[in-house]
Image: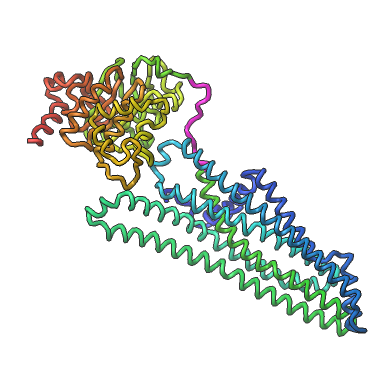
Amino acid sequence: MHNHGPQGINGENAKAKDFKTSIKKLFTYNKTYFTLMIIGWISAMASTILALVGPDKLKVITDAITSGLRTGIDLDKIDKIGFLLVLLFSLSFLFNFIEGLIMANVTNRFSKEMRKEIAKKINKLPLSYFDKTTVGDTLSRVTNDIDTIGHTMNQSFSTLIVAITMFFGSLFMMIKTSPLMALTAVISTLLGFALMFIILRNSQKYFTKVQAELGNINGHIEEVYSGHNVIKVYNAEKEVEKEFDEINERLYENGLKSQFYSGLMQPIMGFIGNFGYVAVCIVGAILTMKGDTTFGVIVAFMIYIRLFTQPLTQFAQAMTQLQSTAAASERVFEFLEEKEETSEIDKKVLDKKTAEGNIEFKNIEFGYDRDHKIIKNFSAKIKPGQKIAIVGPTGAGKTTIVNLLMKFYEIDGGDIIIDGISIKDLSRSNVHDLFVMVLQDTWLFEGSIMENIKYNDPNVTDEKVIEACKTIGLDHFIKTLPDGYDTVLGDTDAMSQGQKQLLTIARSMVDDSPFLILDEATSSVDTRTEIMVQNAMDKLTKGRTSFIIAHRLSTIKNADLILVMKDGNIIEQGNHKELLKEKGFYAELYNSQFQSSL
């Protein structure tokens, strides 16, 4: 994980506070669902109350037991009691069924809504969040953590409510029957509650660590799976296994400790329950010998003490699951409360159909870290239809300029002006609509070739797609596939990296956006294909203001303006011939590439 909680005493207090806060948030997250849940709980409580005989029937039953034991069995009363019990248990079954149905529906809908909230949240988060968080950790919050919350809501909450109802209902009946024996039962169980809260206090931190390590191990596995070929090439299997073993060991240790502590609760509460039962039997026997109570009352009280101690074990089980839920909900709500991108209400709109193509960078200042500036006082003016190449060594800030232009990050200082409108006054969706991008990474998704090229623009005709593929020389290859343009792409498709890149170029060609960004767009194709793509690029960039980032300087000879960047600043600018004549940094870069190719 990238963020670590507080340590020491303050850390323990914070964790205890997080436990209460997380549970509270679950109850206040969606009032509608919890209203339905309360109905289910009422059903559970009703079934529990029905299982306990009402006070008006208590004296009748205890007197019947006493009378029957002294004089014989009263079959009439037995019939009445039997009928009453059948009625009560039938109603209890009905209410339990209703409660289970409501809880299953509510918890699944609740989990569904939480996943939808996370999906919405992902689209609102800035890229800086994903720079510091692994994909696997985010996925773990969507899957493991929400599943844990849903499971607990479905199982523990209803169990907890039934246990509470049974506990206090039994306590009321015991006080009604014999206050002295009821006091004996209460005193004997106080020790159990004290031990339970001590265990909860010490074990919660381990449940939190378990959920965190689950996120870490998912992130590691996702990373290893994505870079499997690189790991094989560099013989890094041992290092990867070592890192996995370290994370797995931490997960094992924290899981062992959390389960050990939580596992103590049930036997302890069971022992306390039995201890209370024995104590009540002794006190009851003494009272009977003194003639202060009847044998029928003792028999009834023994039933109630069992009903009284049974919830103790249910408390222990429910609280154990609630600890996992608190840790999981803490991670989910931490994600949902992440700082979002700035609000974009009342923004101006620039229509891409009428956009001219002017862009001006005014004294741009930016740094991914506030204390370390990547871009320093960057300024440039781009005219409509110009082809702008941005070159420079690795780390010069080329891709950062593009990220700022696309409003992926907020600039720290200066401004970017598009057709006379500050980028700060335009919404991100509007800015993204103005640009089409072709990056070094291939943006292909599971779906047909036609769907990939038409991505997010259903108005594109099939003819336009085929024409774009013919222009870049990809049409013949597509027609050799079993289903042609309807061939479905996936992780196991047989297309090369270069062919995938050509598909992304075809996608950009069918888009009518006025601005174009090419970031190492030809890095995955061979030299012969690169020439073909360059010709296609000339057609693609015609009439568009284009930004081209390239390390191979031979691909940008025909650019209208070349911006040479170093350490976040423009140190040279001009066309290819002008920069070579200056014999500066650009000429040095170009000649070094030319010499290295000999």
Q: Is residue 293 left or right of residue 203?
A: right
Numbered range of the magenta stretch? 336-347
User: Does any portion of residue 565 appear in the rendered image?
Assistant: no
Whether 426 is drawn above or below 72: the answer is above
Whether 18 is drawn above or below 361: the answer is below
Residue 147 falls within the magenta-colored stretch: no
| Colouring chosen for the image of the structure | rainbow
Residue beneath the point at 71% across and 51% down:
38
Kindly give the residue lying farthest to the left in the view shown.
Answer: 598
The image shows residue 187 at horizontal and vertical percentages of 74, 71
For the residue pair 63 and 294, the one nearer the viewer reads as 63
The image shows residue 179 at horizontal and vertical percentages of 84, 70
Image quarter (top left, top right, bottom left or bottom right) of the C terminus:
top left
The image shows residue 159 at horizontal and vertical percentages of 66, 61
Residue beneath the point at 14% across and 29% down:
590
Residue beneath the point at 57% across and 56% down:
151
Q: Is residue 261 left or right of residue 544?
A: right
Q: Quadrant of residue 87?
A: bottom right
The image shows residue 520 at horizontal and vertical percentages of 25, 33
